[in-house]
Image (cartoon, helix red, strand yellow):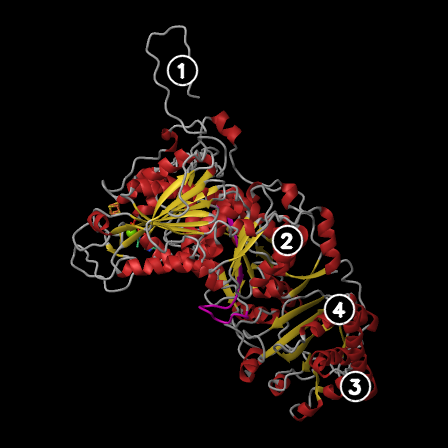
Amino acid sequence: MGTTPVTSTPVEAPKPAAKTNRIGLQVLDYRGGKTTLCAGCGHNVISERIIDAFYEMGVQPERLMKLSGIGCSSKSPAYFMSRSHSFNSVHGRMPSVATGALLANRTMKALGVSGDGDTASIGVGQFVHMMRRNVPLIYIIEDNGVYGLTKGQFSATADIGSKLKTGVINDLPPIDTCSLAIQLGATFVGRSFSGDKKQLLAMLKAAIAHNGTVVLDVISPCVTFNDHEGSTRSYKYMQEHEEAISEVGFVPHFQEIDVEYDPGTTINVEMHDGSHLRLRKLHEEYDPTDRIAAISALMSAHAKEEVLTGIFYIDTQKPSFTDMLNLVDEPLGTLPDERVRPGRQVLDDVMQRLM
Amino acid sequence: MATEHVALVAGAEGGTSVKPDTKQQSTQGNVVNDFSIQIATVNGSGSQSANLVLLKSIFRMGIPVSGKNLFPSNIAGLPTWYTIRASKDGYVARKKEIDVLIAMNPETSKEDMLSLPPGAAAIYEESANLQQFRDDVACYPVPFDKLTAAVCPEAKLRKLVKNMIYVGVAAQLLKMDMAAVEAALRKQFAKKVKAADLNWAAVQAGYDYSSTTFTKSDPFVLDVMNETAGKIIIDGNAAAALGCIFAGCTVAMWYPITPSSSLVENFIDYAKRYRVGEDGKATFAVVQAEDELAAIGAVFGAGWAGARAMTATSGPGISLMAEFAGLGYYAELPGVIFDVQRTGPSTGMPTRNQQGDLLSVAFLSHGDTKHIMLIPGSVKECYEMAQSAFDLTEQLQTPVFVMSDLDLGMNNWMSEPFAYPDKPLNRGKVLSAEDLTKLGGFARYKDVDGDGIGYRTLPGTDHPLAAYFTRGSGHNEKAQYTERPDDYFNNMERLAKKFETARSLVPRPEVVQTGKSKVGLIAFGTSDFATRESRDQLSKEYGLDADYLRLRAYPFSREVQEFVASHERVYVIEQNRDAQMLSLLKLDLPAEEIVKLRSIRHFNGLPIDARSVTDDLVTQEGI
Ligand SMILES: Cc1ncc(C[n+]2csc(CCOP(=O)(O)OP(=O)(O)O)c2C)c(N)n1
Ligand code: SF4
Ligand SMILES: [Mg+2]
């Protein structure tokens, strides 16, 4: 890859070799179908970052399973990484489908895309149990505070006082998916903003390096139904209220670690695959391995009407659900007959006992 | 509770007409190997092992036997009845009338006594004085506590050991082979020699008390036969679990619900024993889900990713699975769902029997959804159909439901030993990376072979053209999103064609036809036992020889229409109120056949019995 072919009839000037990643694939190989979402929708930007992250990490597209529920957000797996198998399931139930798929083939990477409605309302039960199990899945909530696909009703992540275009004001408290995730056992929890290209990309790359449930709540404005004055999920609100808890730096395992860091200001986390996460503290009390500190930071930011972003919590030690089950190394789904059907003497043995 | 029992035993039986059994037991001649024993106890009193010893002793004596547990939806304290039927002719359906009562529950003993037919026998606790209620029943009062205390010095074991006393009394009165009783008991306690000795002493104490105290005044005796050699005893859920083991099932996700839980629990036991390598690593994953939505979601996720996956549930779980079932049908996902049916609607009677989910499962989910159902009629078929279900679900790329019920699933049945599968697993149309290179790509939902079944690929297939997009929204042959009328229409037509393909692949019905009778019977699942016995009653008592077709699957194979066509009247015998199977047949048969269908239904929660079928049929026939 990357070398200019030598031909005997040099009529045209040789094209510059397309840029490739460490496994020799171009960004093109990570593209998906043309989006059908609204122009300017935050979800589209997240899809672009997903493409970048998997390209830069050099993940073979065929090694990824994409899963989603129902919603504008859940449609988006059609718009990135067409070379990966994809499963657009039913509303709020993607975690169970992903769990089953990973039980069948635990050698695959899995990425789930959901919405705030899909996750925090109809799907909150499965969301909770996925985290409790620490299913090895990157679970992205494309959070716009409304149900985009059904034309803009409030979701359960909408803030108190947030206003719909119709003037309706939300007076119920939001479910903070990140606090919930930390409490319930997800091992990598963060929040980002679709408009924060650098932070989101670094977080996605780190998520790829993690083994366990990753919950990324990505604020993703709905330009059609929730980007107006009075909304707490608009581009403008985010520009004014985003507050990063740390600066996320990521050094993948295949890159030489040349950047020095100051242990006084930066936390270094060694990840499952040998990559390194460099978290430069922007908050005094920041400690991403301390759940209580993380939840406290989220709550106090909320009280100050700040939208805290960054990686809040990470645990690289807890075994993932598929590791806990002590399964054979190969995918269960494609084990040959002789490994899954016991021999004749086993049946004889069972029959003897029943006589 | 007591009134419920009276209603159960002596009251109206389902929707069928009731006539008391006309056949009286003779007090002169002996009734050999053809009667039923009912043990009335309190739930949680540990009577189950005594009852099993009794059942298995009869089995060891070579006499065809079946056992049914009629238990409450409760952990301890409510009445429960265990019924054993010995039948020299091999009948295994519930027998409507009780011949020998063992009344151990003071709460219900009066009602239990009153429900007996004249000429029956009753063994009971002396202090209950049950003889005051009936002078037409042979009475055997036993001082259970006194006898128990004598053999069991340890007070806290007495509650359990007491049950073995009645085994001894019954064994003596019914003239059982004591070598068979001892062998059954010792096998039951396996390596626990001390427990076996203690329990055997209790059996002997009961036996001795009976032989020195009573003069037998009832006709019921058990005599050694040779009809059970080489046979096994197993319940349907364990049999289905074993089927899953030999089908190579690798993923099970479930949410506990009676009467299906023991299917998965048995699967776990067998899998731990037979599907774990020497390195301790398992070739299976069983996960207890948060609910049935998650269970079925995981089954389809696993099936999509290539695993043979199953879940087991009952009515309430089936209802929750509805949305996913439609996804499974429309996105064409393999997955096996065991529905061990119980009495509905709603929570209904969780520990009672019904064939009540046929219509809801056949069309589970919105839109034009329909599903394949396999209907086992014996424990052997639970084992075999569990295996066919996995082959069919992968061959047809659609969910397959195995419609068992509480009676079959949770009760003990005699059976021929199960045969080792003679065919390799049929994994259906799955393309490998090499196939894709050869073909230059594929279209997931294209009907290449004319059978309505497309080719699929599994996640992880190492080829740039392997991936496709699975969705429950409108899709074309290439699995792309579509709202085009022709794409939608063609896809739905293909799915209908696939269902036609299924018709010829599912298990065919079992037909007994002489060609001479104008009357045909159609039954299925656990209605089969009573139907077979009723055929004999009809023939012997009324000279009516009815042909018989036992359904084994939906969609119906060709033979079903042929059977109806060759009779003037066809009775569909089933255990639900709304004639659900008859309704399914109506949807399938031409108008001139539909008018021939008549309905016999039984739906009081108890398993259907032959006498109810016979009486109803005779009334409808006007004989
Ligand atoms: C069982 C069920 N109920 C309702 C719907 C309708 N529905 C489709 S998408 C949606 C909400 C999606 O909201 P969200 O997850 O926030 O996604 P967004 O469109 O905002 O990205 C609803 C209620 C459905 N598809 N299924
Ligand atoms: S409606 Fe909102 S969420 Fe849906 S695509 Fe448009 S902008 Fe995005
Ligand atoms: Mg939303």
- Pointer 4 chain: B
Name the residue tied to disc 3: B150
Q: Nearer the viewer, residue A265 or A19?
A: A265
- Which dot, 1 or 3, sits closer to the camera? 1
Q: Main secondary structure of the magenta part?
A: loop
- Disc 4 is placed on an element classified as loop
Name the residue tied to disc 2: B271
The magenta stretch spans residue B343: yes
- Pointer 1 chain: A
Discs 1 and 3 carry the same chain letter: no
The magenta segment is: B333-352
- Pointer 2 chain: B
Where in the figure is residue B300, as x and y percent of width and height? 47, 49
Q: Is residue B168 above or below residue B410?
A: below
**Left or right of A257: which side holds B107?**
right
Discs 2 and 4 carry the same chain letter: yes
Amino acid on which the number 1 mark rests in the picture: Thr
Discs 4 and 1 carry the same chain letter: no
Query: Separation of disc 2 and disc 1 at Cα?
Result: 56 Å
Where in the figure is residue A234, as x and y percent of width and height? 22, 50
The answer to whether residue B193 shows anywhere in this view is: yes
Where in the figure is residue A206, as x and y percent of width and height? 41, 43
Query: Separation of disc 4 and disc 3 at Cα?
Result: 21 Å
Q: In which quadrant of the rendered view does residue B241 lie? A: bottom right
Q: Nearer the viewer, residue A140 or B34?
A: A140
Label 4 or label 3, whichever comes before in sequence order: 3
Which numbered disc covers residue B189? 4
Query: Separation of disc 2 and disc 4 at Cα?
Result: 23 Å
Q: Is residue A271 above or below residue B591?
A: above
Name the residue tied to disc 1: A4
